[in-house]
Structure formats: C-alpha cells, structure tokens
Image: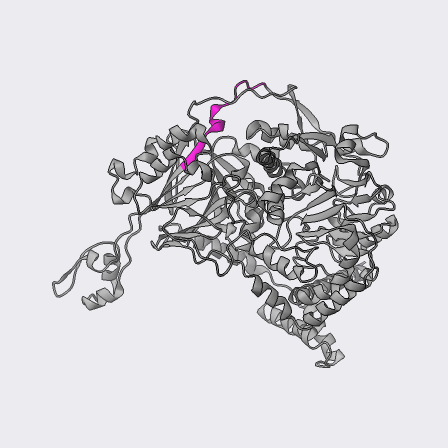
Amino acid sequence: MNFRFSLLNVAFTVRSFHSNQKVFSDRGKDRLLNLLITMPKDTSHVARLQSERQAKKISKVKYPPGTVTLQVLGSGVRGAPRSLYMFTDQSCYLFNSGEGSQRLAHEHKFKLSKVENIFFTQTSWQNVGGLPGISLTIQDVGVPHITLHGPPGLGELFIAASRFIILKDLKVNHVDATLPESSFEDAAMKLNYVTIMPNDDAKLPRSASSSPFEEEDVTNYYCREKGNPEEVPAAKRTRVEDKGDENPLTKAVLAYICRLQPKQGMLLAQKCVELGVPPGPLYGQLKNGQDVTLPNGKTILASDVRSPDDPGPLFLVVECPDESFLDNFVSEPQLRKFQKSNEANELDSPQIIVHFTPIELTKHPKYQEWMNGFSATTCHMMLGVPKYGEERRGLGSVAVHRIQHQLHLLDSDIFPHLPFDMPVVGETEQGEDEELECQILTTFHLRPPKKLNLSLVPMLNPQEYVKESFSREGFTASLESLKSTLADAVPISSRVYPKVTFLGTGSCIPNKTRNTSGILVELEKDRFILMDCGEATYGQIVRFFGHEKAAHVLSNLIAVYISHLHADHHIGLIGLLQGRQHAIERTRSDAGPVFLIAPHQINFWLKQYHYSFERIRQYFKLFSNVNLFEKEKPDPELLTGLNLKSIVTTYVRHCPSAFGVSLTTADGFKLTYSGDTMPCVSLIDIGRDSDLLIHEATMEDGMEEEAKKKTHCTISQAIEVGRSMRAKFTLLTHFSQRYSKIPIFNETAFSSNTIGVAFDNMTISPNRYHYLPHFIPALKLMFADHCEEMDNKTTKRKLRQEREERQLQKSLQEQSVKS
C-alpha cells in the first residue's frame, strides 16, 4: 500500500509541476498510469488497526490519566456557542454544546472522536443547539455510543429531530441527572450532580395547545426521489395525552462537582540509582508504594523515590440562568461546603469554577458574595452571555477573517471587512488574575497542575492574511488587471436593492470557510427576508454586521423562508428566533412575529421543542410552502408585510417537500431561489425571466452520476437552468464542502458575464453583478494551493472510475466466455 501511494504521489507531482516538460515519454507515462489503475487495493489492514486501537483504549482505561485539561470550545458571547471541552490522554468530554460547536471543533481540531459523555447544565438552546451537529460528527468518526447527562427530556430532542437527524450508527443514551443519589464515574474522574430549582419551585404552566392532536412527521427526508415529487407521505396524526401540569424538573438546572481520580506518584529512576536500588522487581514494588530492603540491609522508602501522589484536583461547572434561581443557587449546601468559610481543606478547594451564568447576573451582589466565598486561588472562568450593550468579542473563527481579508482585496464593498470579534495581534492581553471572560482555546491544566494558559488563544493577524495573497506568483499583476477591467465594466443594472448577503454557501456540514445554507435578502431598505437557516446562521449575522447593526437587521427581519427540511437548511431556526426576540427587546421595536414560510411538517419539530424545552411558538407565524403554488392565492398579510407583488413556490427534485421559490418585488425585480434540487423544469417555469437566479451547484462537472444519486446539480447543470430560465444573472451557491475555498469549474462555462460564484460574507447589489465574473482569474491565483489539491483529487477520482470500468468490462467478458 505504501508503495502504491508513493507511485501516486510521483504521478501527480509530475502532472502538477512538470506539465510543460517532457519528463516521461507518453509510453512510459501510460505504463505508470496503467499500473496504478490495475494495482489491487488491500484493505485487510483496516480491521486489524481498528482492533488494535480498541485494545489500546481498553488497556489505558485501567489507570487514571496522566494529563487532564479544560479548554474553551465556545466562549458564550452572543452569536457564539458556549461549550467546555475536557480532554485526557484516554477520553474527552463536553459540558454543554451550543449551536455552532461543530464548526469551531472542526477548525480548531478538537478530537470529537473520543467524546462519549456530554454534560448539560440546562436544556436551553444555548446549551443543546449544537448537539444535533456534534452527534452527526461523532457518528461519522466511528463513535458507537454517546451518553447525555442532564435534566430530563434531553432524549426528546432526538425524537423530535429524528426525521432530519439520522443516527443509524450512533446509540444515544440519556442519564436523568436529577434523580437522587445519581452520579458518574470512570477512570478519569468522579462527577456528582447537583440539582437546582427556581426559588419558588414553581411548576411550568399547562401547555396551551389549541388541539388535543399533535402532528407527527413520518416523512423520510433522506430517501432518494422516486417518480412524482408531489407524492409526499402524508403526516400521521396521533392523539397526545393531556399531561396537565408539566414535571417541574423540566425547569431544573444542573451543577457538576468534578474530582479527578487520584493518581500515584511517578517512580524517579534517577533517585533509585543514587540510592543503589538494583534494576529488577524492586523497582515495581517501589512504584506501587511498597518500601523495600536492599541485599545490604538498607531500607528504601517508596516516598523517597516517588513524586508526590496526586489526590485528584476538584473543579465545578455551574449555571444560574436568572434571578429566579439565585437564592437557591447561592445557598446550595453541596456547593457551599467547598467554600473557605466552611473550613474546606486544601483538597476540597476548587482549582477552577466554570460559570455558564449570564455575565450580568455574575455581577449581582449575592453572586459576587458566593464567588468570594471560595479560596483566593480558585480561578473563575466565565462562559455566560453578556448583557446587551456590554458585548465582548469571542466568536472564535480565524479562518473566516483570513479569507475575508483576502477577498476584500478584490472589492471592498462586495467583501467588506468583518468587525473584529476576536483579539488582534498587538493588543494588550487580559491578565491571568482577573475573572476570565474567555476566548476559544482558553486552557486550564488540571493535571499536571500548570494552571491557566492563555497562549493558545487564537489572534487575528490581518497583515499576514493580505501578505499571504500577494505572495502568490502572478497575483499582483492579476489584481491590477482586475481593477482596470472593473473600471471599464458596464453594469447590467443601476439598482441597489434587493441586496443579497450570503451567510452560508456550503452543503451538508459547515467547514472553516463555508457555513451551511443561509441567504439574507434586503428587499428594500430595512426590509429583510432570510432564505434558509443552517446551523449558526444567527452567529453569522452577528459576525457580518456586528452586535449593534445585527440587532437592527433582526428587528427588521420580516420573513424566513425554508426550502426543505434537511438539517443544514433549518436547524439554525430556533437560535435565530431567539436572537431576533432579544434584538426586538434591545431596540424596543414593535415588530411582531416573523413570517415563517416553510414545509408544514416543520411544525412537528417546533411544537415538540416548544412544549419540551423553551417557549418559541409566539415568535413566528407559519405559512406553508404548498399554499404559495401558482394556482393558490397568497395570504395578503404576507405580500403586504414583504411589500411583494407576488411570491410563488413549486416542488423541486430533491427530497419530499422540497421547494423552489420565486418572488417579485413591488417595483418588478424578480428573484428565484432553487433550494436543493436536480435540474427542474417546474423551477424554470416559475423563474422565467428572473433578474437574479440563486441556484445550488453542489458538485463539479464530471460528477453527474453522484449528483443524480444525491439529487443535486453540477455547476454546468445549474448554469444551464439559468439559461433555460432566461435569467439575467445566475449566482451559484451550496457547494460541496470539498470545495472549501472555490469550486472546480470549466472556465468556458463562465465565458458569459452573467454567472458568479458566492462566498460566505459576500454582499451584492444588482449594480455590482457584472463584477463577479471578472473575479475568477484572481481567485484561482489567490487559492492556487487549493485548486491544485482539487485538481489532484479530480485526477484520482478519474483514475478510480477508469479502474472500476476496466474491472466491470473484464467481469462482463469473463461471464460472456462462460456463457
């Protein structure tokens, strides 16, 4: 296998760097490629390696880990997840998993493959919003099971999301941490649960359901499309028992008392040598804590040749959501016993307390008094949401700023600088003796006890990002040529609105530079509609506009359109609804519920969340996509609210209840959005003569068969839809995450000046459409390494296809001979 991969590297190196030289004769090259194609693949080693890895893991579990570290995965600032990651040399754990955790874990290389236990302080979206994405990631890397520890009802999240979060290979267990005497223990730590209730111990009000019937969604959104896309399984209606007053423990909050398992001191070999201990069994006895007597009668004490035992440091993870919990929280005896006023010994003094409490509440005199009750050596790490008006930085992604600074070189209006939401190189760093309002990768070493470490916190370096682009051969000349071309380019429109801002242009799962689907359209000044809402779309809005302007945008968000119910198109909706409500309260806006235009089956998911976790249904008014077909008459309230002349939907060729949409503004601008689909005649029909078509282009040309299997489009197919529609301009989006920077495309397909490629954090008005096609040459130079990597992968794929075709032909020939 190593020999085979070495040959592949040789072949691709020759192709990439010596394309203009006659290094090999054509005949020699053909022989080499033929060898690579026909060489059999030996995969027998995979099972052996997996078995060895599992055996190694089991052997390690017998001993307490030698290294234990706490690290911030999500800082808790508004728009960012809040999550704490704990890792040892054996296993990893999460405390809370806010929306967007998956993307940050990918960028900063958190090892989710070792996570088997997640602990939740509360069942709010701020804590559980990232769980669906994290679960899919954990499943993909081969984790067989995961256990969720927290208040009752956590399992209902997966029941409600079971139609669009498919966990075939991951078993999810739930531990009700509110049960008396319950706890968790493994080789790394022992963890005790502490249940905290509101001060009045009030029960939740009865569910205000208008009907004893709830709609259960039984649609399989991941089945391949067969036949007529309108043949969608009907939703099943089942009677739901009236539960009366809900279990008061649904309001419970959990605190965690965590103590590492004690670990014996290490044997100091040099000390043994100095004291004359001969190599052999005596070393093992001393390591196990036994005193030994040497042949000369000298007694060696184990304590003289071992480092001190580590009894296991203590740390706490707490949350007090609001003042209704405060009195019970600060008086909780299981937490107070570790305070210095209760004569806690040094071993019972927490090394660190991680606070998921809102920052404003931590300033309350009662909370401050509670914190001051602990030892002065206790570190306090703050991961709570700050008060509006006292926002702090900490969204956590360096990659987003890197690519934005580079794209900004092409055009400063289309790719504006993002507000600095992270520390910048050269700024004064936060002192280690303060209450830490943490950034991502803030680190605390529990074992060995190195304490706080801020050196890993990522910092933005704009000058480095720009310098990186100009270091590319030919980029400077290409940029100068681009500027000259744009100065002479003739716009195809003089309009400023509708203005389109891309918040997510990737498919399936987020990567460092492309989030999942989200397109913000400003139809006219301060009148917004959001088309699709992938995970962390709310965070993308905050990142693009900054906290102040984001609140203004969200307060003026009139509608959210959901094309279909795959998770990457709507799982960010709950966070967006809550973010919009906070923005309305901050700006004191009189905005009403947002219009939610979506497949009606979404109601099952939103109702289930509403009744099981947090009240959200008052934040939206649902309009079914089906009711916007051409033959239907749209609700006048919808047209008036958006100031539209028309809005029309149609089924598209993707999954059940997948829709495309075309809307026309009051002054006649027509915009069509495909959602996810294969080439679709009905979309062409409703989008005829569009001013702008936004169409998915998931895969590169040459992958038509795979695109068909997954019911998506290639780039050329999407372009052809635009031509058939007679769209004045076509913008391509929803690229496979293999194209993290730019997709692979045939430049002849872009010969027309009516086609552009979308990027995250790109904002475009009709009077700038004509700029986009001219960016292509500079983009290919800017991301030359990525393009080369993609070309190599394309070559490998073609070689694999050729090998499979030859094997198929050989098999058919053998069958023909036998017959």
**Residue 658 magenta:** no
Q: Position of residue 596 (x, y in %)?
A: 70, 33
Residue 576 shows up from this direction? yes
Q: Is residue 350 left or right of residue 404?
A: left
Query: Does residue 609 sit above or below 385 in this rendering?
Result: above
- Residue for point 73% across, 40% down: 563
In which quadrant of the rendered image does the N terminus lie? bottom right
Q: Position of residue 570 (x, y in %)?
A: 66, 40
The magenta region covers 242-255
Q: Position of residue 617 (x, y in %)?
A: 63, 28
**Residue 250 magenta:** yes
Q: Is residue 624 left or right of residue 459?
A: right
Residue 218 shows up from this direction? no
In which quadrant of the rendered image does the C terminus lie? bottom right
Q: Is residue 286 left or right of residue 204?
A: left
- Residue for point 60% across, 33% down: 588
Front-most of residues 398 and 51: 398
Q: Position of residue 129 (x, y in %)?
A: 56, 40
- Res 39 → quadrant: bottom right
Disc tally is 0
- Residue for point 56% across, 48% down: 102
